[in-house]
Image: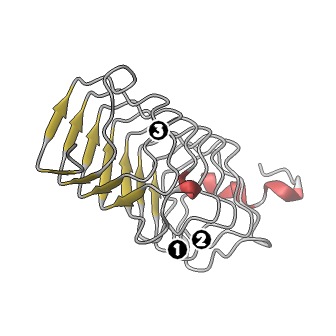
Amino acid sequence: MKTFYEDENYQNKNFSTFPFSRGKYDNCLFEQCSFSQVDLSESSFINCVFQDCDLSNVILKNTSIQDVEFINGKLLGLSFEDCNDFIFSASFDNCNLNFSSFHKVRLTKTTFTNSQLKEVDFSQADLSNTTIVNCALDRAVFENTNLEKTDFRGSFNYTIDPEINKIRGARFSIPDVIGLLAKYQIKIE
């Protein structure tokens, strides 16, 4: 059984019914594939692109994600804290990550662009120098999170308590910056 896959293209594969082979995937393209509820544990993805893929509720136990791009993806309910934390690096463009968790994950220099991040758990994560631009953050959890130099410009519906999060040097845009004052229950007119 092959355990190393390099420079391969996978299109329109349904790995929920077509068996997924665990292994190391390097510089591979997954396009319009379904991984819904598939066990990706112990696999490694390096320099890979997942475009128009459904990865909802996949299992990520000790999965390595390094320099991976997720484009137009459906990534509902993922537990990224289960991934191998050595050199975790990814970018998310126009993705739906609702109900996912990055609890205690080191996400420095990660990019989230034009994505849905509703009810995502960022508690105790390191998002320093991260870009979260034009994203919906309804009920996202930020507790003891490092947000230093994080770029939130254009993102909206977030509530961040500056007293329990590190926000020095973070960038926000008006009028959404009022999400920093939500805990005070004040009226801004």
C-alpha gap between disc 3 and disc 2: 31 Å
> Can you identify the residue that label 2 sits on?
147
Near-viewer residue (95 or 29): 29
Closer to the camera: disc 1 or disc 3?
A: 3
* Mark earlier in primary sequence (3, 2): 3
Q: Residue at x 68, y 67 (%)?
A: 124
Question: Taking 110 as reference, is 18 left or right?
Answer: left
Which mark is first along the chain, 3 or 1? 3
Q: Which mark is residue 128?
A: 1
Residue 39's disc is 3
What is the distance, in whole Å, between disc 1 and disc 2 at their CAs? 5 Å
Of badges 3 and 2, nearer the viewer stands: 3
The quarter holding residue 24 reads bottom left
Q: What amino acid is labelled 1 in the image? A: Ser
Tell me the SS state at disc 2: loop
Which quadrant of the figure has residue 111? bottom left
Q: Is residue 27 above or below residue 93?
A: below
Q: Distance between the Cα atoms at labels 1 and 3?
A: 30 Å
Above-or-below relation of 103 to 164: above
Residue beneath the point at 23% across and 23% down:
12
Q: 43 left or right of 135? A: left
Q: Which mark is residue 137?
A: none
Q: Percent x, y for residue 54?
A: 40, 30
Quadrant in which the N terminus is drawn: top left
User: Is the residue under label 2 in contact with that under label 1 (CB below 8 Å)?
Assistant: yes
- Give x and y (percent) for residue 46: 27, 59
